[in-house]
Amino acid sequence: MEQKEIRLNAGKRKSLVKDYRRHCEILNTSKKEEFKQAREEAKESITSAFKTATTVVQRRFPLEDVATLQELQRKHNTINAVGNDSCFFFKVTDAPKVLDQYNDEVEKSKHFSFELDGSINGNYGTRYGSGSSNNGKNFAYAMYREEMKATGLNPDCNIEHDIKHQDVTHSYSRNTNNNPYLSQCRNDNSYFLNGKTGGTNMYENWNDNYVLQIIGTGGCRSRAIPCSDLEFQKFEMMIQAKQNLVTKHTKWIESIVAKVGRLEQGIKSMTKFSQVEKFAAHPKVNWKIDDEILADKIGMDIVVSIDDLADAIDNIDKSAPTREEKILAYKKANQMVN
C-alpha cells in the first residue's frame, strides 16, 4: 500500500497538543525535581514541627488534666471542655515584642495550621481563597497531585487560571472572575479529597495524623498558647516549607504551560502530520506520540488499491476494530512487532 501525507485538522491538532502536555509532565526536568524535593522537605518539616507543637500544647494542657476533665464529662454528662484540634495560635513569651502593621509593639504570635488545606501564611481563614499562593487548597493539590491526575482531575487548575489572568491588575477581579471550568475543577477536586467519589478521604487521613487535645472552647484564634522563640521558629520553618512546595509546583506548571503554548502556536503553521512527527523526533524533544493518536492515523493516509477497496467493502458488515487492534495494526505496519 502507498502512503500519502496526512493533513492536520483542528481535532487532530487538539489531540496532539493534549498529548504533548502529557509528554511534558513525564519529563524529568530540573523544575519537576525541585517540586518533588520540596514536597519531601515539606513532609519532613511538618512532622518535625508537629513534634514541637505536641510538646508546647501538652505543656500548656497536661495529659493528666485532659484525662481528669474527660472523666468528669463522662461522669456528669457536662459540656465538653476538651476538644481535638489541628490548628493553633502560638505566642512567644521569651523574646522582645515586634512591630505590627500599625507600627505598634505586640507580642510575636501567629496562627499555625497542620490541616491539609489549612493556611500556609500564618493567617487564619485563608484556606478557602480562590487561586492565590496563600490558599491552603493549593498545598493539598501539590501534595496529592499524582493521585488526582490518575483519576482524571486537574490539580493544576488554580495555577493555570492565574497564568491566564496575569494581566488583571487587582487580585479580587482575578479571583472572582466567572469561570465555570475552574469552578467545576475545584468542586471535583474537593469531592475527591473528601472521599466523596468512593475513594479515601485524604483530608481525614491527613488531619488524623496531626491532632492534639485542647482544654477550652472556641476556635484556634482564641487560644494563645505560649511557646519559646526557638519553638516559634520551628513552626515558621514549617510555613516556609509549605509555601515553598506551592511555589515549586507553580514554577513547574508555568514552565509546562509555556512549552505547550509555544507548541500550540507552532502547530497552527503545520499542515501535515509528518511535520509533527519530525518535531517529535527532534533530539531536544524526544516526544513519543501516544499510540492511539498514531493508530487513528491509519485509514487516513492510505491510497487504496482495487484489492484494498474490495477488502474494505467486504469488511463493512464486520465489527469495527477495537482500540487495541488499531494500535496493533499500526505497530505491524511500522514493523514494531512480529
Image (cartoon, grey):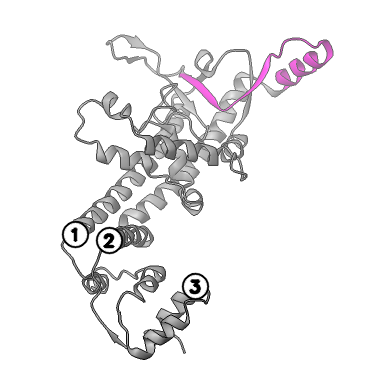
Q: Which residues are magenta?
A: 64-91
Which residue is pictured at 59% across the width and 24% down the height?
A: 57
Q: Position of residue 308 (x, y in %)?
A: 38, 87
> Where in the figure is residue 98, as x and y percent of width and height?
34, 16
Residue 318 vs residue 120: left or right?
right
- Residue 116 horizontal side relative to residue 63, left or right: left
Q: Secondary structure at mark 2?
A: helix
The amino acid marked with disc number 2 is Arg
Q: Residue at x 37, y 68 (%)?
A: 293
Which of the numbered marks, if any, corresponds to residue 316?
Answer: none
Q: State whether residue 116 appears in this view.
A: yes
Who comes first in sequence, dot 2 or dot 1?
Answer: 2
Magenta stretch containing residue 155, yes or no? Answer: no
Q: Which residue is mark 2?
A: 13
Asked whether the beta carbons under mark 2 and mark 1 sit within 8 Å of each other, the answer is: yes
Closer to the camera: disc 3 or disc 2? 3
Identity of the residue drawn at 69% across and 13% down: 81
Query: Which residue reaches farthest left?
Result: 269
Choose between 157 and 73: the one closer to the eye: 157
1 vs 3, front mark: 3
Q: Which residue is mark 3?
A: 320
Front residue of 316/234: it is 316
The 10 Å Cα crowd at callout 1, few under 14, some 14 to 19, many 20 or more, is few
Amino acid at circle 3: Ala
- The residue that disc 1 covers is 268
